[in-house]
Structures are given as structure tokens and as C-alpha cells.
Amino acid sequence: MKYSRHITPYNEFWMNCILNSAYSVATGFEDSYSAAAYLNNYSYTSWGAAIDIEFMTPTIEVLDYSDHWENFVLSAVIEKETPVFFKNPHDFLPDLQKIISEGEIVKLNVDLFYWLPKNIAWNRFHMSHYSIINGFDAETKMYSVLDDDVDGYGVHTIPEDRVVQAFMNSYAMTELAGEIPHAYIYSIRKDIEPFRMDKSEIIKHADRLIEELSVFSFDDLWNFKDEHKDNMDEYIRISLIGVNIIENRHIGNELLINKLADLKLIQAATYESMKHYAKSLQKGWKLIKQVFINNLVSENKDINVDLIRNKANEMLDMEKKMWLTIVEERDMKLENKESKRGVTS
């Protein structure tokens, strides 16, 4: 017997595994929330790699979703994620299958080392995360999952023995056993209001980003050391994860700019200027990504980190100019309003 729930993967651009999963679920109930992904509610940050916590790489973090879900835009669709601890985690499939057969949307904690053959972590390094399981076939013992690999975020079919292996080696069963849920069930709100783009929110985040971009720097990141040389490919792959998220965010920024123009929320000149910056940012980050890829496929692993850092810092300055464009449009309107008020008084 087959049980499945159709979920269209959200893949207009890549944010991260948690957010693309959440947007896939949310847009299945209210498709207007596709545009909510474009919001500039993000911030630059750095994180320690799974293979080496001291190796810091940059990435982009969307605000609120991980620590204040009630303030996050998708909370209007997904009320919460209910944690699940299987009664017998060493024989969890009956519980998992029951959840799926009852029509619930569930995501399971898995180790990417055993998960998808074309995922960057497959048979290379251990990294635990949650993957949506949206169906199974009891006869063929195959499971349908939503997850990402080198081809993007999409639907994959995984044999049952691999589902078991990936779960049994996940952090929920090993390093953090008993501390983090084995799975989560998405709880969907009954009454969902359509998403509406708010220009004032975009400008608020633009103001914040201008300040943050003025102080953020890549100078202390991507610190490749001599002891990394024997495992350099894995450090490069880890670096590519964050660079790919940053590059994709600028695809999202272009989608945001197009949406603002479609809704006639920005002037034509502002649109053209911001679109130019967004395209240039995508191109610049693609060049940075290509440097890492070239070193990945080359026998020469001597990475010119100074070149990468300088280019990345240059991109920060360009991004700040992009957000200044919409802020200056606002300020100009305020000045004109004050000027007219002065004339009439």
C-alpha cells in the first residue's frame, strides 16, 4: 500500500534545508507566501564547520525562524513544529509510517553521510539535519523525501534500509540522544491570511543591513591551515555551502526587487539601480564560488584566500549601495513632503 502527500519543493532560490522545507510546506497551503521568501530579513554570520568547529566560514541567516518562530513570517501558516520522540527508536518505522498514513507532514532527523548520493556530505562527512518524509510504499519499501543535493532541492526516493541507517546514525540517536526530537510534525493554522508585501518592512531591514554590512568583514574567515592540506577538499566543500547560500540570497534579492516593481512600490530609477546591483552581486559571488570549485577539481590546493576575502568585502560594499538606493528614495520622498508642507504653511 502506498501513502503519500504531494508537496511541491520550493526552489526559486536556495536558503537552507530548514527554510526551503518550511516554504515548500507553507506554499502548499497558501501560495502567496512564495514571495515572503524574498524578504530582506537576513543577516551575515559565520559558523564552525561540521568537520572542524574552529574552521569558520560565512553564511547568511534569516532572522527569527530559528529562535523566535512566532515573529517569523511563516508563522502565519505553520503555527509550530511539534516534536516527536518515537516510543521505540530502534524500531521507529511503524510510528513513522503511522504519522505519514494519517496525513501529517513530518521531518525526520538523519545523517547526511548516508542519505543522498549526490549530496555534498554523502560518504564524506557526518552532518545531521531534518528531512521531510512525504510518503512510503509498504510493498517496495521505498520512501519519498524532500531534500537537496547538487541538482537542487527536490523529491527523492530512498530505500528503507537507508532511511533506517541515516536515522540510527543521526544526532538524535548518537551525540544528542534523548536531547533533540527524533522528528517534527508541522502544525498548520486553520485560517491563513494571504501574504502581502509591506514596503516599510523592506526599508526597515534595508536600514539594518546598511549598518551591519558596514561592520561585517570576511578578513578572519576561511582560515585554511597547513594541517588542513590532507583533507583540503572537505574544507573547500564546507566553504561552498555558505558561499552558495550567499549567492542564492542575491537571486532572492533580485526576486524581491522585481516584486516591488510589479507592485509599483518603487520608482523606475530605483528599480533599475537595484536590479543592476543585484545582478552584479550574483556575478561576483559566482566568481568567488568558482575559485573554490576550481581548487576542488585541481591538484593544486593552494587557495588564494586574500583574493577571495578582498572580493567578498567588495561585494559587501556593493550590497550596501544596493540597499542605500531604496533608503535614499524614501528619504527623498520625506524631504519633498516636508518641503511642500513648508510652502503651504
Image (cartoon, rainbow, N blue to C red):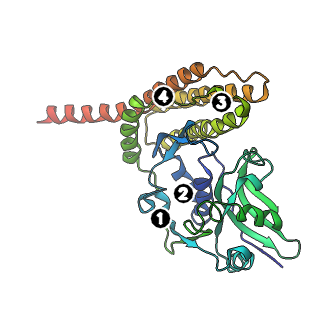
Earlier-in-chain disc, 2 versus 3: 2
Residue 280 - label: none
Q: Which mark is residue 33?
A: 2
Question: Where does the image place residue 333, in percent across and percent down from the top left?
Answer: 30, 34
Element class at badge 3: helix
Cα distance in 3D space between marks 3 and 1 = 48 Å
Nearest to viewer (mark 2 / mark 3) = 3
Q: Residue at x 60, y 49 (%)?
A: 16
Question: In this orientation, which residue lies closer to the viewer: 173 or 342?
Answer: 173
**Which residue is disc 3 drawn over?**
227
Label 2 environment density (alpha carbons within 10 Å; few <14, some 14–19, many ≥20): many
- Which of disc 1 and disc 3 is earlier in sequence? 1
* Number of disc labels: 4
Q: Which mark is residue 76?
A: 1
The CA distance from mark 4 to mark 3 is 30 Å
The residues tagged by marks 1 and 4 sit, at their Cα atoms, a distance apart of: 32 Å
The answer for how far apart the CA atoms under marks 2 and 1 are is 9 Å
Do residues under tags 2 and 1 come within 8 Å of each other at their CB atoms? yes
Which is nearer the N-term, disc 2 or disc 1? 2
Front residue (pair 104, 167):
167
> Mark 2 belongs to which amino acid?
Tyr
Residue 57 in picture, x, y percent from top left: 56, 36
Residue nearest the viewer, comparing 156 with 299: 299
Distance of mark 4 from mark 2, alpha carbons? Answer: 28 Å
The answer to which image quadrant residue 111 occupies is: bottom right
Task: Please provide percent x and percent y for residue 345.
Answer: 11, 36
Which residue position holds label 4? Answer: 316
Nearer to us: label 3 or label 1: 3
